[in-house]
Image (cartoon, coloured by chain):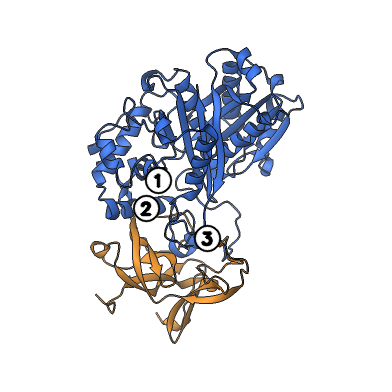
Chain colours: A orange, B blue
């Protein structure tokens, strides 16, 4: 499939450009907190300014924890054909933890695994193929 | 603020009741509570109901009004509160303050629920909002509620070495307690082998380690000391009632969040920790004073993690405590003598109130085969969507 025609399953949180995939989030200009997805306000109670600007997130991260989901979730998630897949929480630079699909052999999964942001194709019945954010093992990570 | 007492409690057994409307379950629970309190409908000056998003409430969450119109139109004050799975605790907290303030002498609380089958889905008609974590978790990841709990369980295995067999043993303990509870849905004891043989839902959690969804209803009636003395029986006082929300930087993998901002030094599931600490302070007690604890065991992970998180044990200590028998009825800190969510299945908004029913039955010595000997201080802790925490301490 020609990847140039693929668009994110939710446009507002994922962007593809020549630099690769980026998650779209927010940064607080006053206290520096990063958020995913984009927020209307900083939620740090000690932050008085709460000035939010768009921010790109992604690149390298570390797998905090994971699971392998063995049962098909309710409609809305367009993985077709269905098969068990891994979901994990990933610590990205700047103190933000993001949930995503983890594309790696199940027996490679462990907390602490170096991963990086990537994308994967979902088949959405109504709108054709779309992509969603995933994390894959980062072969370039320093050991 | 004046002292407040529990006058009576009642529940409809948990199960799947397709032929009984939610209001029917509610009336059953309230009739039982009124009978226990030796009160009639007209004696209720107020009703605080936990609002459901699944059924009833005239589309506006007006569950108290719905009940009043269904069973007793006598002009009582109706208050409807949200709080998702902690809504029953929010209702209790509200009713407690209504009586404590002196404005009301007798106020009932109610939670009644009939749950949709299977994984709890998005609310019907919810908009596709790209800032809504619930939309994003379904649309971009497909993450079910058990997936969130499973990630916590996997992290626990990594941090403190919990084994899959220990998770299974925690589930077995809940089922063993539930076997003695006529209100529980699952009353057949199971073995570690049976739990381990049940289907893997979301690694490392298996079907028998995750709470089902159930239908049920519970009611707790609160009143003044004069009311309690009229009712008779040992006085059961509300020693502490607290609700709280989460703290910035909480490291929990919280449903339905797809992004979080964990910070060092912030309590895990801080909404529940905050509520429990406030309830202890109000009751002038600490963890060493608690004779039994009812906690929200959505999974076997919760049975192990929560006593540590709440300050009863050191991190990683629960596994050894479970193996030593400390968490069972007859042990040093009985956890969920009722059988917990793993034996009931979760009827969301009713759950915190059936926890409080159990505290009452235990303190009154009415808990039969699951009775904690000479229980004098009993405590509950519950968690709801939106970082809602609730905790109640009752004492005899």
Q: Which residue, given by chain and number where applicable, does mark 2 sit on?
A: B152
Count the labels in the image. 3
Q: Is residue B307 visible?
A: yes
Measured Cα–Cα span from mark 2 to mark 3: 18 Å
Does label 2 or label 3 sit earlier along the sequence?
3
Q: Position of residue B239 (x, y in %)?
A: 54, 29
Q: Position of residue A56 (x, y in %)?
A: 49, 77
Q: Is residue B132 left or right of residue A16?
A: right
Does label 3 or label 1 sit earlier along the sequence?
3
Measured Cα–Cα span from mark 2 to mark 1: 13 Å
Question: Are the residues at dot 3 and dot 1 in contact (C-beta closer than 8 Å)?
Answer: no
Q: Residue furthest front?
A: B284
Q: Is residue A35 left or right of residue A72?
A: right
Q: Is residue B1 above or below residue A81?
A: above
Q: Which residue, given by chain and number where applicable, does mark 1 sit on?
A: B309
Does label 2 or label 1 sit earlier along the sequence?
2
**Circle 3 chain:** B
């Amino acid at each position: 499939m020609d990847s140039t025609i693929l668009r994110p399953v939710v446009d507002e949180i994922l962007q593809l450009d020549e630099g690769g995939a980026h998650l779209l989030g927010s940064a607080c200009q006053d206290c520096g907190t990063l958020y995913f997805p984009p927020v209307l306000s900083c939620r740090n109670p000690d932050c008085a300014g709460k000035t939010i600007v768009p921010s790109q997130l992604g690149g390298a991260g570390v797998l905090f924890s994971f699971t392998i989901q063995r049962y098909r979730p309710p409609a809305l998630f367009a993985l077709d054909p269905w098969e068990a897949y891994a979901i994990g929480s990933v610590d990205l630079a700047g103190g933000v933890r993001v949930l995503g699909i983890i594309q790696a052999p199940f027996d490679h999964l462990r907390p602490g695994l170096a991963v990086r942001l990537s994308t994967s194709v979902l088949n959405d019945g109504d709108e054709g193929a779309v992509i969603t954010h995933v994390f894959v093992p980062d072969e370039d990570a320093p050991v | 603020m004046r002292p407040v007492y529990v006058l009576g409690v009642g529940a409809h057994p948990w199960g799947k009741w397709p032929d009984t409307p939610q209001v029917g379950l509610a009336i059953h629970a309230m009739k039982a509570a009124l009978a226990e309190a030796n009160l009639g409908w007209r004696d209720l000056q107020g009703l605080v109901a936990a609002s459901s998003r699944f059924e009833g409430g005239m589309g506006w969450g007006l569950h108290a009004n719905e009940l009043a119109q269904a069973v007793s139109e006598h002009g009582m004050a109706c208050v409807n509160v949200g709080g998702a799975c902690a809504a029953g605790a929010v209702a209790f907290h509200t009713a407690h303050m209504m009586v404590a303030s002196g404005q009301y002498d007798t106020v009932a609380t109610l939670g009644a629920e009939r749950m949709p089958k299977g994984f709890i889905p998005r609310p019907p008609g919810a908009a596709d909002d790209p800032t809504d974590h619930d939309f994003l978790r379904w649309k971009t990841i497909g993450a079910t509620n058990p997936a969130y709990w499973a990630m916590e369980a996997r992290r626990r295995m990594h941090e403190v070495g919990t084994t899959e067999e220990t998770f299974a043993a925690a589930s077995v303990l809940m089922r063993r307690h539930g076997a003695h509870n006529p209100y529980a849905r699952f009353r057949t004891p199971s073995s570690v082998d049976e739990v381990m043989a049940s289907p893997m839902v979301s690694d490392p959690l298996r079907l028998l380690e995750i709470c089902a969804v159930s239908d049920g209803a519970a009611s707790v009636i609160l009143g003044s000391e004069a009311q309690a003395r009229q009712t008779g029986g040992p006085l059961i006082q509300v020693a502490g009632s607290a609700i709280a929300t989460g703290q910035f930087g909480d490291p929990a993998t919280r449903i339905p969040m797809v992004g979080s901002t964990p910070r060092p030094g912030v309590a895990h599931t801080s909404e529940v920790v905050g509520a429990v600490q406030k309830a202890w302070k109000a009751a002038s007690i600490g963890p060493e004073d608690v004779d039994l604890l009812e906690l929200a065991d959505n999974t076997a992970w919760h049975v192990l993690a929560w006593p540590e998180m709440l300050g009863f044990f050191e991190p990683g200590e629960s596994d050894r405590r479970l193996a030593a028998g400390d968490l069972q009825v007859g042990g040093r800190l009985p956890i969920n003598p009722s059988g917990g969510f793993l034996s009931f299945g979760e009827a969301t908004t009713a759950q915190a109130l059936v926890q409080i029913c159990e505290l009452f039955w235990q303190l009154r010595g009415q808990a039969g085969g699951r009775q904690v000997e000479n229980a004098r201080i009993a405590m509950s802790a519950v968690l709801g969507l939106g970082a809602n925490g609730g905790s109640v301490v009752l004492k005899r």
